[in-house]
Image: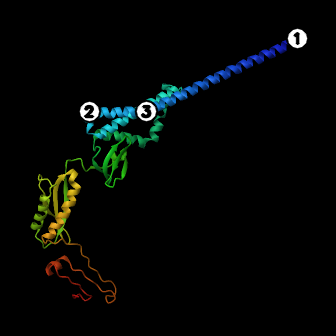
Amino acid sequence: MSSLLSPLNRALAAGEKATAIDAAMIAKLTDMAGDLAVNLVIAAVILVATVLAARWVSGVTRRALSRVRGFRHDQTVLSFAVQVVRVVVYIIGLIAVLQRLGVQTTSIIAVLGAASLAVGLALQGTLSNVAAGVLLLVLRPYKVGDVIDIGGVAGSVQRLDLFTTQMSNANNHKIVVPNAKVLGDVILNLSGQKTRRVEINFTVGYGEDLNAARAVLAGVAEAHEKVLADPPPWTGVTGLLDSAVQITLHAWVASGDWWQAQADLMQGGKEAIDAAGIEIPFPHQVAVPYGDEDVMPVVTVRTVEQKQSRGPGADAQAGPDGGEG
């Protein structure tokens, strides 16, 4: 009888042991799941807090730097510094989230160090934009509000970020240029100086009084309210063209008045030359006969010299035989 009970007791003991192990495993898994859920919730709270903290710190930084004289009138450095502070807060919050999820800081540094080369090669364009943004901030070839021309694209600088420079052109089009391209191209700062020179080329006939034409153009510039007296306006003959003499007008104005002053001087110069009876010649073309002249008559437009010799009111056409029609 005892021989039959012994195997039964051993089976019962083994069953109780297995049940105890299963219960311990279930309890451990339950604890792990609970810890994971708690960590996930806390990590989510840290992430949300990071976003809110980044906005708050950015606002505090902007208000604090706005009180500093060096940043108050320079939105370029101000916006750049605020963005750097925001990125730093995001990085700190991300590290805190990873630590809460069980990833050790030393492991994060090791992983970042191992992956830095691969990430650098994959994102070399992006990283070059960041480096270019820092150099643009240090070298200061332009600032927010300046009108610049980069590779033939002109616009007013609205913002300088870590990666891009944002501009707006005269048609209010948003232009985004990578900082690496900005730094590697020719930067033409159209409003970097307080004054700019207006240069307009006019043409008059060879038979006209050049001194009188120069005096007329100089008078138009001197009478304009936006033209500066120092340096004074300048006019001079700058070219002998095929059918006209080129006279150039130089006038200095404030940078903000350049566009309107140029338009005003161009219109005023044209009207003043017309009022003075000075001819502004235009290109002339002569039709060359080809084939049968009887079928295809030739009409010849008189040249500037012919017009000057015949007077301003004369007009002639030449037939196939060269006579006047």
Three-letter amino acid code of the residue under disc 3:
Leu
- Residue designated by label 2: 68
Q: Give the Cα separation between the discs numbered 2 and 1.
A: 95 Å
Q: Are marks 2 and 1 in contact (CB under 8 Å)?
A: no
In this view, which residue lies farthest toward the top?
Answer: 2
Q: Residue 164, relative to residue 110: is it above or below?
A: below
Which residue is pictured at 42% across the width and 42% down the height? 126
Three-letter amino acid code of the residue under disc 2:
Val
Q: Nearer the viewer, mark 1 or mark 3?
A: 3
Q: Quadrant of residue 30?
A: top right
Q: Give the Cα separation between the discs numbered 1 and 3.
A: 74 Å
Three-letter amino acid code of the residue under disc 1:
Ser
Q: Are marks 2 and 3 in contact (CB under 8 Å)?
A: no
Q: Is residue 170 something that shows in the picture?
A: yes
Q: Are marks 1 and 3 in contact (CB under 8 Å)?
A: no
Q: Residue 152, relative to residue 247: is it above or below?
A: above
Relative side of 317 to 217, left or right: right
**Among the two numbered marks 2 and 1 on one chain, the one whose residue lies closer to the N terminus:** 1
What element does badge 2 sit on? loop
What element does badge 1 sit on? helix
Residue in the foreground of this view, choosing between 184 and 130:
130
- Residue designated by label 1: 3
Assess disc 1: are there few (<14), some (14-19) or many (≥20) residues with their C-alpha within 10 Å of its C-alpha.
Answer: few
- Residue designated by label 3: 52
